[in-house]
Image: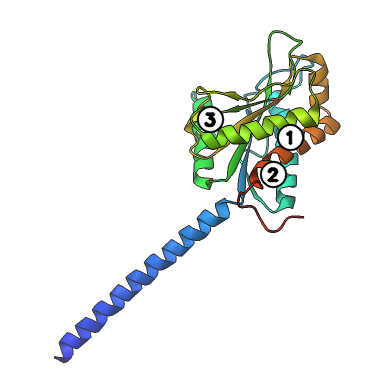
Amino acid sequence: MKKKFEILMVACLFISAFLLARASAALTSSRHAASSKTCIVLDAGHGGSDPGKVGCNDALEKDINLSIVLKLKTLFENKGYKVVLTRSDDTVPADENSRSVKVEDLRNRVKLITDTNPVMTISIHQNSFPDASVSGPQVFYFEQSAESSAIASVMQDTLNNSLNPPKPRVCKSNNDYYILKKTPTPIIIVECGFLSNETEAALLVTDAYQEKLVRAVYLGAITYLESGKDVPDTAT
């Protein structure tokens, strides 16, 4: 009888330990989900051996993208958000000696975003077009993501109102860009301007215009996030 009682006690201890472990895991998962609501991923397009677009003034898209992202990071962190970058220097998240470096780069960016589970991802790029007169910022989103579409609409309106381009553009859906169609959480691409336009290319390399642009992107994101969304309580 005593032996049966001891076996029963051991079994109860194992069950209790198992249930406690599951409860702890659930709590950790819940905390992660909650924290991701205050996390934003900023993606500086291109980098390393991939310069992106080359401006009519020889400016490299990759450098402008990174400069803008680092400025954005400061604003979001000051607001209380956790910010994760896909790159923080002139490198890409892939082996640059690989023959498939571009594919690895994009896959690794998507994986980082997926693992982070942010409330929003903003991918920063610069545009170019054969017609040098074309200018102005434009926002792209994945057509099948209703939330990304909503974010893009707010962002485009904010950019147009803040920067006053000669011919305001409209946000546009895209089903081909890998990072848009493969990212499971809300994401937009912000093409900040045209490096093929002499006036805009000259502006995009200046700190003053980048600050103005960054403020507009930040305002667009915050306007959307604070319209009934969960946001940090540590606003400054």
Front tag of 2 and 3: 2
Please give the residue where the numbered disc 2 appears in the rendered image.
222
Please give the residue where the numbered disc 1 appears in the rendered image.
68
Could you tell me how far apart the alpha carbons at marks 2 and 1 are, in whole angstroms?
17 Å
User: Upstream in the sequence, badge 2 or badge 1?
Assistant: 1
Left or right: residue 129 versus residue 172 is right
Judged from this view, the residue extending furthest toward the front is 228
Please state the horizontal and vertical placement of residue 25, each as a whole percent of the image: 42, 63
Q: Residue at x 71, y 50 (%)?
A: 77
Q: Nearer the viewer, residue 92 or 236?
A: 236
Left or right: residue 222 versus residue 105 is right
The disc at residue 180 is: 3
Q: Amino acid at mark 1?
A: Ile
Q: Amino acid at mark 2?
A: Ile
Q: Is residue 123 above or below residue 25?
A: above
Could you tell me how far apart the alpha carbons at marks 3 and 1 are, in whole angstroms?
20 Å
Please state the horizontal and vertical placement of residue 163, each as a whole percent of the image: 80, 28
